[in-house]
Amino acid sequence: MADWITTREAAEISGYNRVYLYELIQKHRIKAQRFGPVWQIDRQSLQTYLQQISKSVDKRHGARKTSKRRTSS
C-alpha cells in the first residue's frame, strides 16, 4: 500500500519547489495521484527518484542550485 504525502511534504523532503514536483508528476518521473483538488505523491516513488538522480552522472536532472544575489547596502 502506498504512503501518500502532500506536495508540500515532498518539497521539504526533496528540496525541490512544488512547481518542479508538478513537472516530475506530469513527466511520470514520480508516482502521484489526485485526491479531489489535492495531488499526493507516493513517498517511495520520490525516494527512488532522488536516489537515481544522486547516482546519475548527468547533472542536467534534479534541482538546480541557485546563486544568492548580493544586494547593495
Image (spheres, rainbow, N blue to C red):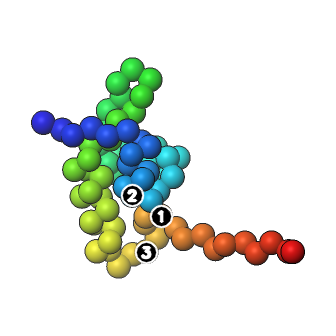
Q: Residue at x 39, y 58 (%)?
A: 14
Q: Is residue 16 left or right of residue 29?
A: right
In contact (CB < 8 Å): disc 1 and disc 2: yes
How many neighbours does mark 2 have within 10 angstroms: few (below 14), some (14-19), or many (20 or more)?
some
Q: Residue at x 27, y 38 (%)?
A: 4
- Kind of residue sitting beneath label 1: Ala
Q: Secondary structure at mark 3?
A: loop
User: Which x, y percent locates residue 64?
Assistant: 52, 67
- Kind of residue sitting beneath label 2: Ser
Question: Quadrant location of the N terminus?
Answer: top left
Label drawn at residue 63: 1
4 versus 51 height, above or below: above
Can you tell which quarter of the image residue 35 is in?
A: top left
Q: CA distance from mark 2 to mark 3?
A: 16 Å
Q: Secondary structure at mark 1?
A: loop
Label drawn at residue 14: 2
User: Which x, y percent locates residue 39?
Assistant: 39, 33
How many neighbours does mark 1 have within 10 angstroms: few (below 14), some (14-19), or many (20 or more)?
some
48 versus 65 height, above or below: above
* Label 3 sits on residue: 59
Residue furthest out toward the bottom: 57
* Residue sitting nearer the eye, 71 or 30: 71
Depth check, mark 2 against mark 3: the one in front is 2
Q: Residue at x 26, y 47 (%)?
A: 43
* Residue sitting nearer the eye, 41 or 25: 41
Q: CA distance from mark 3 to mark 1?
A: 9 Å
Label drawn at residue 71: none
Q: Residue at x 21, y 40 (%)?
A: 3
**Mark toward the start of the polypeptide (1 vs 2):** 2
User: Which x, y percent locates residue 13?
Assistant: 37, 55
Q: How many marks?
A: 3
